[in-house]
Amino acid sequence: MDQIYKINIERSVLSSILFDNMIIEDVLGVLKSTDFYLPAHKKLFEIMQKLHNEDLPIDEDFIRKKSSTDELDDEILLEIISANPISNIKAYIAEIKDSSVKRELSALAHTIQKEVENENNSSINALDIVQNELYKISTDSASVDIKDMPTIVQETLDHIKLMKTKGDSYLIGETTGFVELDKNTTGFGGGDLVIIAARPSMGKTAFMLNIAEKNLNIGKGVILFSLEMPTHQLLLRILSSKTSIPLQDLRMGKLDDIQLTQMTKAMDELNQLKLWVDDGSSLNINQLRARVRKIAQKKENNISMVMIDYLQLMQGTSTKDRHIEVSEISRGLKMLARELNIPIVALSQLNRGLESRPDKRPMLSDLRESGSIEQDADIIMFIYRDDVYREREENRKEKEARAKGDKYISNFRTKIDEEAEIIIGKQRNGPIGTVKLIFQKNKTRFIDDNSKYSPTTTEFSEQIDTNMETKMDISMPGGL
C-alpha cells in the first residue's frame, strides 16, 4: 500500500499560505489541523489559523511571536519558507484530505481488530462502535461546495419545470393516502423529518400503517422499524385495513369461508409489496442508519419512506442524559432523510400533562423532550379523537356512581366510526390547521371525511416566515 501521507504536498500548501494569506480561506473550508500528518505541520497550521482568526498577518515574524520556542520547529519553518508556492491549491488540498481519510480508515481497521479480540465485548457492541466511527469519518470527509446565485436560480427553474409537468397535481412529495391531508401538505417531501404524535390509544400505529399501505400499493418501497410491536401484529393490522375484516376476528382466527378467501387473496397481494420490517426492541441511530442504507442503496427496492414506531423507544449511543440522546436521534434522522432525499416518519409520545387540561388537543409543547424534536422536524402532526376522552370520562363517572351505590345512565354510545382530527402543528413550508378523518376502530384504519380542511387564521405566507425564523432549512430541489 502507498504511503498515506504526503509531506511535500503539506509543505507546499503551508508555503502557499505564507505567500498569499488569502489562500487560508480555501484551506480552512476543507482541512483541519488533524488532517496534516507531520506534527510540526499540524502545529504550524494551528498557529496560522489563530493569526487568521485574530486578523493578523501570517508571516514568519508573527508566527514566531504566536508560538513558544518549544512549539515551533525552526528547521521545518525554514523548509516551508523556502518552498515554492503552488498555483493549483485545490488539488493539493484534496490530496491532503484524501490521505487523512485513508489514515483514519487504517486506524479504524486496527479498532475493528481490537474490538473483535476483546472477549468481554459482544459483537453487537463492536458493530455499534465501528459503525459510529465510520459514520464520523464519512461525514467529516464529505465536502459540499457553496452554491452561487446562478446555480441556485437554475436548480429552482428546473424544479419549477418539473412541477409544471405534473399539471394541476397538488402532490409534490410522497402521498399520505388522504386527499385533504395531501392537499395541505403537498405530500411528504424528500429530506423531510415528519413527526406524528399522540397520546396512547389515539391510533398512531394505525395511521402510520395506513400511510405505508397507500405508498406500498403504488409500488413504492417502505422500511418500517417497529420497536413496540412484533411483525405478525403489524401484519394483522394491515390485513384488517386491507380486507375490512375486524382485527379481533383476525386475531382469534374467527373467519368464515368468504373471509378466509379474502385473507388469502390479500396475503398474495402483500407478498408482492416492497416492505421491510425490523421489529427488534433495541435500536440506536447508528444501527438504523446502517440498515436503511443497506436496503436503500439497491435502486430496485425503490425506497421512498422510512417509518419508526416510535422515537422515544430508540436508544442513544454516548450519554445517559435522555434529552441529549433524543437530540442526537432527531438530528440523526433529519440528516439521514437529507442524505437519502426521502421522508422519514417517526411516531412520538406526548407528555401526560395535557390530560389535565379542559381542551386536550395537543400542541407543540406537549412533545416529550420537545426541544430538539420540534427544531429538527419539518412537519409535526397530532392525532386527536375526542370520543376516547368522552368514553373514559363516562366510565369514570359510572365507576364512581357504583362505588356510592347509585345508578348512572350515560348518554354516550360507542361508535364504530369515530371522528378524528389530524392537527398540523408545524409545517416548515406550509400552513398549519386541522384535517378531519374518520377512524374505523374495528378495522384499525383511518379514511377520508367529507368535511373540509380547517386552516388557522395565520396566513400561508406568515406561517412560512414564522417557521423559517425558527430554523431556516433550504434544500433545492425538494419543495418550494
Image (cartoon, helix red, strand yellow):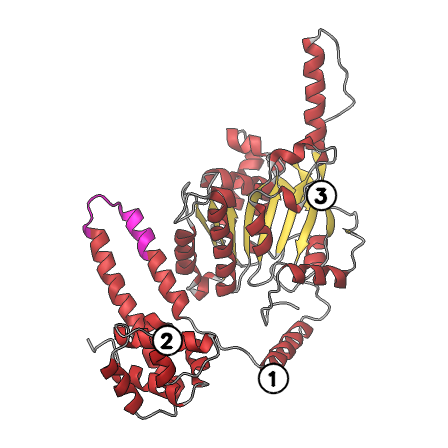
Specify the segment rendered in magenta. Answer: 117-130
Q: Which residue is mark 3?
A: 421
The tag earlier along the polypeptide, 3 or 1, is 1
Q: Residue at x 72, y 12 (%)?
A: 401
448 shown above or below 169 = above
CB contact under 8 Å: marks 3 and 1: no
Residue 172 image position (x, y, % from top left): 64, 65
Q: Which residue is mark 2?
A: 66
Q: Residues within 10 Å of mark 3 (few under 14, many from 20)?
A: some
C-alpha gap between disc 3 and disc 2: 64 Å
Q: Nearer the viewer, residue 470 or 214?
A: 470
- Which amino acid is tagged 1? Pro
Q: Secondary structure at mark 2?
A: helix
Residue 167 image position (x, y, % from top left): 71, 71
Q: Nearer the viewer, residue 410 or 147?
A: 147
The tag earlier along the polypeptide, 2 or 1, is 2
Q: Residue at x 32, y 77 (%)?
A: 44
Q: Which residue is mark 1?
A: 150
Q: Residue at x 26, y 81 (%)?
A: 6
Instruction: Locate residue 413 relative to residue 57 in the image: left or right.
Output: right
C-alpha gap between disc 2 and disc 1: 41 Å
Q: Nearer the viewer, mark 2 or mark 1?
A: 2
